[in-house]
Every structure is written in C-alpha cells, then in structure tokens.
Image (spheres, helix red, strand yellow):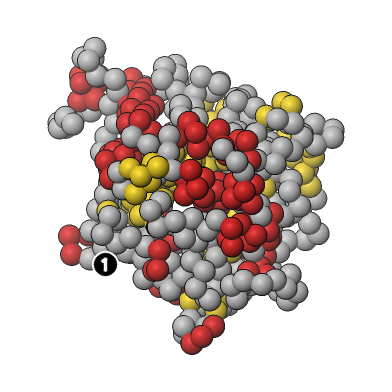
Amino acid sequence: MAAGSGSGFEEAVGADPAIAGVSPDRRIGYATSRPATEAAARRAAFPDEKAFTKTKGEPLAGRQWDMRMIGADRAHAKAPGTRQVLVGVIDTGVDGKHPDIAPNFNRELSRNFVTDKPKDEYGETLDGPCEASGCKDAVDVDDDGHGTHVASTIASPLNGLGIAGVAPGVQIVNLRAGQDSGFFFLKPSLDALTYAGDIGVDVVNMSYFVDPWLFNCANNKSDTRKQQLEQQAIITGMQRALDYARQRGVTLVSALGNGSTDLGHPQVDKQSPGYPKGDEKERQVDNSCINVPAESNGVISVSALGPSGRKAVYSDYGNEQTDLSAPGGDVLDGQGTQATRSILAAAPEHVLRAAGRIDAKGEPKGADVVKDCTGGTCSYYQYLEGTSMASPHAAGVAAIIVSRFGKPGKGGLDLAPATVEQLLYKTATQRACPTPRQYVYKIFGQTETHACEGAPSDNGFYGHGIVDAWKAATVEP
C-alpha cells in the first residue's frame, strides 16, 4: 500500500512498471439486489397474495417456491450439509442474532473488514451516524440487510422457525466487506478473500460488483490516466485475491449483475464511475471491459430466474459469462406484479424499522415483509429480487457438495474448487434457450428483447443449467 496526496499521486505511482494499478482506499462497490418494493412503488402497492403452496417443513416453507424449484426442500432430509463446512458471506454483514440465522452463525471466525463512514468526501450522508465505537460494527451486525438475506438463503437452519436455507446444516461466516450504504472498498474485498483462504472457508458468496466502474476497462481512451490505473488495480488486485483464495480451496460464487445487459456484447456504460455521485459519464465499452468479480477468472457466475423458470428481466446474461442459473425472483414474471415472486429470506428487524417497512407495533406494512412468531419467537423476513438472491442458491448447493465429498482439511472439510465446479455443472438441470431465441419481455406496456446464444448444455441465459440441490444430494462422484 502506498500513501500520498495531490492529483498527480496516482499517476506518479502508476508510472512505476512494477505497479499493476492504483486505486484509492475508498468505497468502490454496490451490492446487486433489488428491493421487491421497487415495482410496488410503480403500482402504488403490491396485491396481497394469500394463497401459498401447503408443504411440510418450516412455517414459511410454502412461500419458498425457490427451494422447490431446485429441489432443496427434498434435499434437506438427504443432505442438509455438515457443520464442518464453512460458507463465507462477503457482503454488508450478517445479523448473527437473527433467530433463523443464529444457530448456524460462526461468530468466532467472522470478521468485519470495514469502518463505517458517516459522510462522503463532499459532506453528503454515506453510512450515516456511527452505531459503534470507532465506527466499527460488531461481527454480528448488518445495518443494510443485504448480507443477512444472502446468508439466510444459504443456511437458515431447520429449527421450526420461518424458512430453511439451501444447506441448513452448514456454518455461516460473516466476511464483511461492504459499507452500511451498500458500497465496497477494494481493500476490504481483498482482505475478505485472503482471510477466507487462510481460515479454510469452503465457499464464498459475492453478491456485489466492484464499483465505481460497472465495466472495468484497462485502457479506455475516454478515461483519464488516473481512471485507467484505478480500473487496472481493480482487475488485477481482485484477480490475485481470487486466485489466492481458490488455490487454498475456496469455491468462488458470484452474482452476475442486474443491468439487463448481454455482458458478451456491452456497448455503452452510462453508470461509471458511480462514485462519487455525479461523476458518471457516458463511454463506449466492449467485451475487453469486465464486471468484477463476476467476469474474473475462476469465479462461478449466476444469472437469476423468476418463478416460471424464465431468465429474470433484470438479470445480466452472456454466453461466455453465465455459468449457472438459479431462482432470484422476478415480480413481473406473471400477470401484474407480486412481491411473492421474489425470494423470501431473513431480515434484520432494525433495518425494517428504519426503512419504514414495519410499524411501531412491529407489524409489516406490506406484502414484501413477513413476520413469523411460531413457538413464541418472532422473526422477520423480506422478499428481495436480484442476481444477489440467485447466487446464494448456487453457493448453498456448492456447500452440499463439499459436505458430501470433502475430505478432512483446514477449517473442517476440503474439496478442490475445480471438483466442486464440475459437480455443480454435472448436477445442474440443463435448459435450452427460449424459442425464438430473441426473448421479448413485456414491462408495463413496453417491451425489451434479450438474445440467448448457445446450446442447451451451455448458453447465455442459463449457463450449464439451473442449480439442483436434490441432484447434488444424491449424485455419485
């Protein structure tokens, strides 16, 4: 790490041939999720869906169409996962005290790699007032809710409360790299990956992209030298950290992104640099520019599906980029909009209160939030949609595979990431591109067309297929 100031510092350091790139130590990422309430805002309110599939299992299992889609409900009895398997959640934090997460939360190994920043460089509110001494939240705190939702989808336990995750028997390790505001520094991301490799984490879920650049281009002519160096630092630095973790047995799973973009044929980037706010510019991009970590080497990237099994309208795609697909929710996948077409998972009560999603008595204000008080213990759940919600389904299936085939090693069990990847692809349910391949989405009276390329065994919408927990629980090596 180098320290300095002045507008020419990055350029001066970057002139050294030994330096791969230069990135300021500031927040540079934003979690890729979409609150189910976005569609509600456009229609004033969600219709309240009362009818849910009656099924055995946890009290809210009937609402988990996602688990039925991938056979996780059946896999729970066969292969729920073992506590010897550690799944790292690199995100905004995890509410380790949530009743439907606490039994599987490993507080001892969890780490917070970020310090909250109340305001940004321009004095605008960023994370808001600090809740902890030194602006360093405890390892069981999530003031955003994104990481808690992800962790719940992976491993909410079979405890008679709320829901169950894909692998309800494994342990969750909070590897916090995101600010309360949902943005990420480069250094905490690198620290989280390095730490995951050092302590024997088996799988990490990365439901975020490294901002401020939606597309990182090494030498885009429309960027200043300083901006080029920053993007080079992101590309190279993250790749080195990802390689470090993978070489130490960490299977890397990432959300693909929510830009409705064919990542194999990007043309224009209007969102970068996304921080500080107002610095965005329009620039031409091509396939040499990448989304990090989704397009980094060694990463399994996951597109999102709606309840009908179609690729969600918001989900990025691409024949080279999509490795697997999984349920991520799509409120528009059907007539009208319904929150229940999104993914239900645990939510921190204080976050819901702050967002105005529950009232003073603790009752939900809309269909996007669910309260469960089975057995006298009350906990909250929220419907969210996004590739952020798809990725943890794949991470959970990977955890099942490690639980079944891993050998004793550092941290518990060990299974080579290449083997996990092979078994994920082997057990995925192949799905062909739609016919016609130019799939037309209808969105509030307008249309949007996405082109699917590739064969049933590997295509831009579904990758090698839809992850399948039941097949992972029963496949022979």
Most foreground residue, 15 or 162: 162
Farthest top residue in view: 17
* Image location of residue 285, percent across then percent down: 54, 23
* Residue occupied by mark 1: 131
* Image location of residue 113, percent across then percent down: 26, 49
Tell me the quarter of the image containing the C terminus.
top right
Q: Amino acid at mark 1?
A: Glu
Most foreground residue, 400 or 11: 400
Q: Secondary structure at mark 1?
A: loop
Residue at image coords 59%, 46%: 472
* Residue 51: quarter of image: bottom right
Reply above or below: 400 against 268. Answer: below
Reply above or below: 25 against 229. Answer: below
Looking at the rendered structure, the number of numbered marks drawn on it comes to 1
* Image location of residue 263, percent across then percent down: 59, 29
Residue at image coords 24%, 25%: 10
Most foreground residue, 59 or 123: 59
Tell me the quarter of the image containing the N terminus.
top left
* Image location of residue 138, percent across then percent down: 26, 63
Q: Residues within 10 Å of mark 1 (few under 14, many from 20)?
A: few
Residue at image coords 24%, 12%: 17
Farthest right residue in view: 436
Report if residue 470 is visible in the image.
yes
Residue at image coords 49%, 33%: 419
**Left of 281 or right of it: where is 20?**
left
Report if residue 211 is visible in the image.
no
Most foreground residue, 293 or 474: 474
**Left of 32 or right of it: where is 175?**
left
